[in-house]
Image: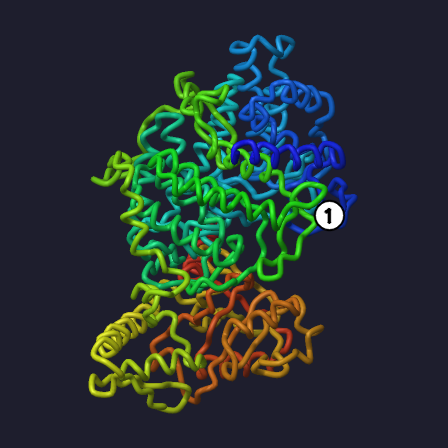
Amino acid sequence: MDREEAREMFYHAYRAYMDNAYPADELMPLSCAGRYRGVTPSRGDLDDTLGNFSMTLVDTLDTLVVLGDLEEFEHAVKLVIKDVKFDNDIIVSVFESNIRMIGGLLSGHILAEYVQKQADVMTWYRGELLEMAKDLGYRLLPAFNTSTGIPHARVNLKHGMKVEALRHSRETCTACAGTILLEFAALSRLSGEPIFEVKAHAAMDALWKMRHRSSELMGTVLNVHSGDWIRRESGVGAGIDSYYEYCLKSYILLGDERYLARFNRHYHAIMKYISQGPMLLDVQMHRPHTKTRNFMDALLAFWPGLQVLSGDLKPAVQTHEMLYQVMQMHTFIPEAFTFDFQVHWGQHHLRPEFIESTYFLYRATGDHYYLHAGKKALKALQKHARVPCGYAAVNDVRTGKHEDRMDSYVLSETFKYLFLLFSDPAELILNIEDFIFTTEAHLLPLTLGQLGNHTFSGVRDQDEQVHMLDYMRSCPSPNKLFPETVRRPLRDLVTGVCPRISSAKRLRAADFQASNTDHLRTVYDMGITMVSLGEGKVQLLHSFHNAKSPEDAERGLIFMQEMVELSNSNSIPNTQLQAVAYKREGEREMRILEAGPSHFGMELVNDFAVVQRAVFAKPAKVCSALKNAEEIRGKIVIIERGECTFVDKARRVESAGAVAAIVIDNTPNTSINNQQMFAMSGDGRDDVLIPVVFLFTKEAEQLIKAIKEQPSLELTLMSVTALKEKLARASITKTDTKSSDSKMTP
């Protein structure tokens, strides 16, 4: 029976952890040992999840109750109370500590009190887990001391933010900052201490104000001090996923209609710009018709489950079906896969999101198809991930090679959702309908919303205008046969036995690369020819007569229209111009050269500036290994355009330690006075962190001359608008001082 097999799988992993790893945070299933922070070899940022606080056991408490094992639950609660401590000099992820540890402790507390009343067991329990959650909550609070109210990504459990390693902390992801409210609201309402819910509401309010007002989309990485976006890519996967989840679930749990309004506004934008049939493709939040990468990541598999919760069943069925076919094609859903469903990143970390969506679709439709999909996932885990000491993550789905890793969510979510999928609700000791699942699948009772909220006045921010879409509600279709009619046209989406849907096949202008031979062949088939105009420019000519077929000719016409739109969107307004500024010896005024921005790297916004000496790269075009890497470290690097992509140049100098880069044009006589400024394009990856700006030839010649005459010259890279405002303020201050001085003279 599948239900009992799912139960046995949980205990195989749970016993492996308890017998070989506890009190470590995680089990290393290949080593059959525990993973301790500061003892086992570091995995870099991945270890920010760990705090030497027995995370897997805390994360797993409520799964034991779902399985009906009250004896082991009681034993586990006693262990947590006795052994788990938070007074550790360790830097941890605020997001992970909240969803895994605070969520686990609160759910454990709630269910301990629940079984006290329902089963008359654990009569000794007096709220110890709640006190522990409160202790940890207070240790996370220093991260919220920012000018925006958006929390830092990491905090030290013992010293807060007062450690050297966090002195320059500024970046966090949208999901990291926006996946706090359910746990913090529950903590406030259960403990009677409002500070936690106050902080979480403030963070959500700040994020809402940062959305792009015309597209209603969010970026993925932001600056917690200034509130500026660092990464403007928008999707529903990594870096942003659970923010959308908590917008909807905060409304469901707390009854606060602000969050329903926000979710509906975001959801409409996602379905308009990001949803492409069954696929969900990342776009630029400020240019939502521009795709930012050529792959999807596995974390988006939660989205169909959230769509079920919102009542939009048809697209949930479509996306789930696409994911199911990808899973069947590769045994597991790879960490990332391309638009034609090939492996982009081959890892599979035993993630729960696909099984979670399968569970919610089955509960909504009663369609046994989803039981078959769940069984397929179960068998894949048994055959390809099970090892003698638990379940091991798959390092590459193409080879099946294992990784010495079993995250706590495998027990908290993956096996919990598998067990629930194959269980009749009447067989459970809990009424699951009385609870909402957090993003870590912890159970919070819907009655929390009735406890009252002393932390929020309910007054709508004047900035939040009411839209017609804000309070739309929808309900799942009661037609149990409905999913099959939606799945049928998608049956061969991945295998390609039937023709692919046109939206996945057509080459879009935003994706076109002149160096890609397949792209050149495709545009040629569409009747498009390229004519070189010299100076690195090409002209595209379209003819219906040269196209391979009438359909290709029509695609060519659409492609040309997109190219025109893309060209127009790539020209930038004056407000986005960047400044390369300097003041030569003996000069009173600062010289400002206007430069173009890039679609990659850090944005120079508000008062953010880079001030440093400049170094010329060798070789100048930086399309091969740098010969003066040591000289570049800590400097602004001047690079020549040509031979390789802008972003490849940036990666090379960043790896050498450059703090910023200036790309200078290689075409004679170009100037901002005779050319339309543009933003340098990237390649969809968001791995460049330094700012990069572009200077036309005439402006570059002025800069080069100044540096050669004064090698110690300091450059300032900044937004043109912000720099001019700063200089104007300084001028006014100087004038006021002189005026004041003259009045004081006898």
Give the camera-side residue of 333 and 262.
333
Residue 186 drawn above or below residue 499: above
Does residue 123 appear in this view? yes
Q: As drawn, is 298 to the left or to the right of 101?
A: left
Residue at 41 percent of width and 77 percent of height? 513
Residue 107 drawn above or below residue 532: above
Residue 733 drawn above or below residue 640: above
What residue type is disc 1 on? Leu
Residue at 46 percent of width and 65 percent of height? 684
Residue 392 at x, y percent in the picture: 66, 47
Give the camera-side residue of 192 and 42.
42
Residue 599 at x, y percent in the picture: 44, 65
Total labels drawn: 1
Quadrant position of residue 472: top left
Q: As drawn, is 34 to the left or to the right of 115?
A: right
Quadrant position of residue 391: top right
Disc 1 is placed on an element classified as loop
Quadrant position of residue 491: bottom left
Give the camera-side residue of 367 and 101.
367
Residue at 46 percent of width and 76 percent of height? 695
Instruction: Determine crowd level at label 1: few under 14, some 14-19, many 20+ residues with C-alpha closer than 10 A.
Output: some
Residue 498 at x, y percent in the picture: 33, 65
Residue 585 drawn above or below residue 13: below
Q: As drawn, is 430 to the left or to the right of 123?
A: left
Reading the image, the residue beneath label 1 is 30
Looking at the image, the residue that sits furthest to the front is 1
